[in-house]
Image (spheres, rainbow, N blue to C red):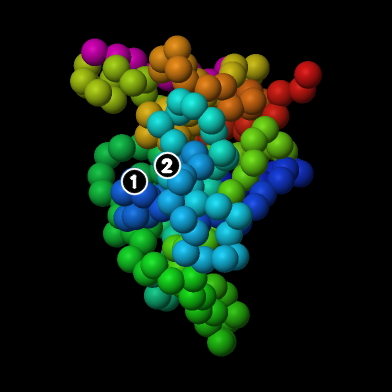
Amino acid sequence: MADSFYRLKDGENIPVEPVGAMLVQGWLPGTWVKWSTTPLSFSGAIGTVERSDGTGTLAGFLMNGPQHITPMEQLSDMWRMDMLQRDDGEMRQNWGAHDASPAYFVDPIDKLLNRAGTRIVQMFIPPTGYHRHFVFEVNNLAERTTPGTGAALTYVSGDKLYVSNRGRLTSEMESGSHTWTGYVVARFGTDEILGEYIVAVAASG
């Protein structure tokens, strides 16, 4: 079992309601969002959010992914371990959101969460705390747009972290309109099982 986002220390988070075409089929933990003007349908959330393209005001990033697998195969992110953050296949079979209710189902025997709806999720408010991300951009925008024309991204301690046009952390400022998240790279490393990761920390001062 594995998660693609780990909260290491501190940080503020609030409940939000994911909306919009880019989140309707599911999302990966660590996906960045912006505030939406769509009215709330669930009073337990602070507001509605849509996936961010990295420009304008960054509301924060979603801590968990929707869970609709029974029995539960992975903890909260619903991504396949052999794919991690890499774009080499279809991942929606593991983390696709199909239930628009806030319903939760906990297995009565092992007491583990088996299923959760998609109407409310915890959002991390930037730039607070520090955390480890296994889902982030590995190639720059040019390479993602036209393979062979760009390059792989590097992550060096102290680098500023931005949000890509797909709502993922990136070391690339993709345009002059892209907003700095307030986080920097504290460490870039590799877990022998889970793959490469970024430890992001809120910049001080």
Mark 1–mark 2 distance (CA, rounded to whole Å): 6 Å
**Which residue corresponds to the image point at 24% horizontal and 13% vertical from the top-left?**
149
- Asked if residue 137 can be seen in this view, the reply is no
The mark that comes first in sequence, 1 or 2, is 1
Q: Return the x and y of residue 147 as percentages of the image width and height.
A: 22, 21
Q: Which mark is residue 51?
A: 2
Which is nearer the eye, 47 or 164? 47
Q: Which mark is residue 107?
A: none
Q: Which residues are magenta?
A: 149-156
Dot 2, how many residues are within 10 Å of its Cα: few (below 14), some (14-19), or many (20+)? many
Residue 167 figure quarter: top left
Q: Quadrant of the C terminus?
A: top right
Residue 186 figure quarter: top right
Above or below residue 187? Residue 103 is below
Q: Return the x and y of residue 117 as percentages of the image width and height.
A: 45, 68
Q: Are marks 1 and 2 in contact (CB under 8 Å)?
A: yes
**What residue occupies the far bottom of the structure in this picture?**
108
Dot 1, how many residues are within 10 Å of its Cα: few (below 14), some (14-19), or many (20+)? some
Above or below residue 82? Residue 159 is above
Tag 2: residue type?
Arg
The residue singled out by tag 1 in the image is 22
Above or below residue 18? Residue 11 is above
**Which residue corresponds to the image point at 60% horizontal and 55% vertical from the top-left?**
46
